[in-house]
Image: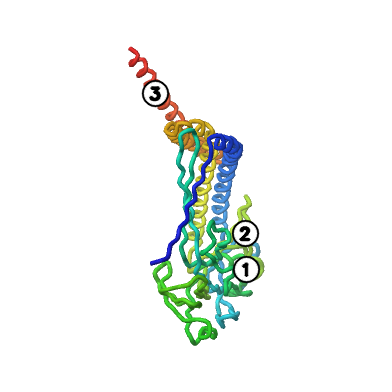
Amino acid sequence: MEENNNFTEVTSQSWGSRIMESIKSVIFGIVLFLASFIVLWWNEGRTIKVTEGLNEGASLVTNISAKGVNPENEAKLVYLTDSILTKDMLTDDEFGVAVNALKLNRVVEVYQWKEKESSEKKKKTGGGQETITTYDYSKEWSTTLIDSDKFKKAKGHRNPRVFVYEPYSESVKKSFIGDFQVSDGLLSKISNYEEYPINESNLSKLLNEGTLIKEKNASGKLITKIYIGTGDKTNPKIGDTKVYFKVINPSIYSIIAKQMSNTFEKYTTSNGTNIELIKAGKASPEQMFAQAQESNTVMGWVLRGVGFLMMFIGIKMVLNPLVVLADVIPFLGTILGSGAAIIAGVLAFCLSFLTIAIAWIFYRPILGISLLVIAIGAFALFYMRAAKKKKQKELSIIHNKN
């Protein structure tokens, strides 16, 4: 069973201190609230711009052969598919690896301590607050160096200050698809790595430094690693290291980019959208543009979520002083805090929708007006429900008095 340590710290904060802290946070909340409008507006413009740019690219792309460079296609957006090959050898001299590949990556995992922090806040009568923070320490394999000097309890949980073997990566200087040289920009976009098989015959440093082990990767496939250290696979020690290699082998790729002589560059559409696409395997231009549009859509929704979250947190921070004031009676503060979260959520939702709708009215009027109607309807529904509850409460008070 994996060793596990923990350390608990209890801190207290007075009501007055909490009030002052919440008032200071209002300024940041206002900044966050205002910044959310900028993010939402910019994102809609970006999403529409990229969509229109990709549509333009799809209408202009010219299919060409990788064999022979045709000057008539100079500066045009072109599509081709063929094998990307290289004559270069990529090497890792420390481990004696030499392979004819497009990319070589040495992956290093080191067994280290990791600190996990979790906090629980408890309100106290009078508005004060007690925070119970627990620091859990566990051991795990990590590809990044974990700085144990920053641990709350560093004693007994010391990690190595440096890796015995650093991660290493290399790409070929020259690779070709037919008669065209692949640009560095396109090469940097490919990431379909696969395991580089290692054994005692092709790893000159293996016998002196470690032993071979097999482990499953994230997809469940067994890969070979070199284990270096004083422990072993079943009982690792802090600082023990595992090394394995990944490569991108020469294979078939599909490219959409601007032809410049016998190589490629980004193609810029009339609205300033840059197009430079590469995909492993044979894919049609339609498939590649569809995938690019899908990625743009996903990014658009991610940034909408970021904008909404910024607005929600900003509004909550502005309302927080009222919640802290009510915390003098913990039960009342909890109720008000829940209400503030609901109000912040509804306002953020309506205002985000409103901002997106106005942006779409600016960029695409018909769809923008539809979104605006939805946003106004949601806000009106919230207002009417709140007014109805208020009226029912007033009638209930009158009824009780009678």
Where 366 sits versus 4, above or below?
above
Label 1 to label 2, Cα distance in Å? 13 Å
Per the rendering, the mark at residue 388 is 3
**Three-letter amino acid code at the position of disc 1:** Ser
**Three-letter amino acid code at the position of disc 3:** Lys
Whether label 3 touches label 2, CB < 8 Å: no
Residue 150 seen from this side: yes
Q: Secondary structure at mark 3?
A: helix
Where 90 sits versus 48, above or below?
below
Of residue 220 and residue 269, the one placed in the foreground of this image is 220
Q: Secondary structure at mark 1?
A: loop
Q: Position of residue 346 (x, y in %)?
A: 46, 35
Mark 1 and mark 3 lie on one chain; the one further toward the N terminus is: 1
Could you tell whether 399 is left or right of 343 in the image?
left
Which residue in the protein does label 1 denote? 183
Q: Quadrant of residue 163?
A: bottom right
Which residue in the protein does label 2 denote? 267
Mark 1 and mark 2 lie on one chain; the one further toward the N terminus is: 1
Per the rendering, the mark at residue 314 is none
Q: Residue at x 55, y 63 (%)?
A: 146
Whether label 1 touches label 3, CB < 8 Å: no
Q: Residue at x 54, y 74 (%)?
A: 106
Residue 372 seen from this side: no
Looking at the rendered structure, the number of numbered marks drawn on it comes to 3
Q: Residue at x 56, y 70 (%)?
A: 65
Q: Position of residue 28 (x, y in %)?
A: 60, 40
For the C terminus, give its image quadrant: top left
Q: Position of residue 304 (x, y in %)?
A: 51, 45
Mark 3 and mark 2 lie on one chain; the one further toward the N terminus is: 2
**Three-letter amino acid code at the position of disc 2:** Tyr
Of residue 153 and residue 402, the one placed in the foreground of this image is 153
For the N terminus, give its image quadrant: bottom left
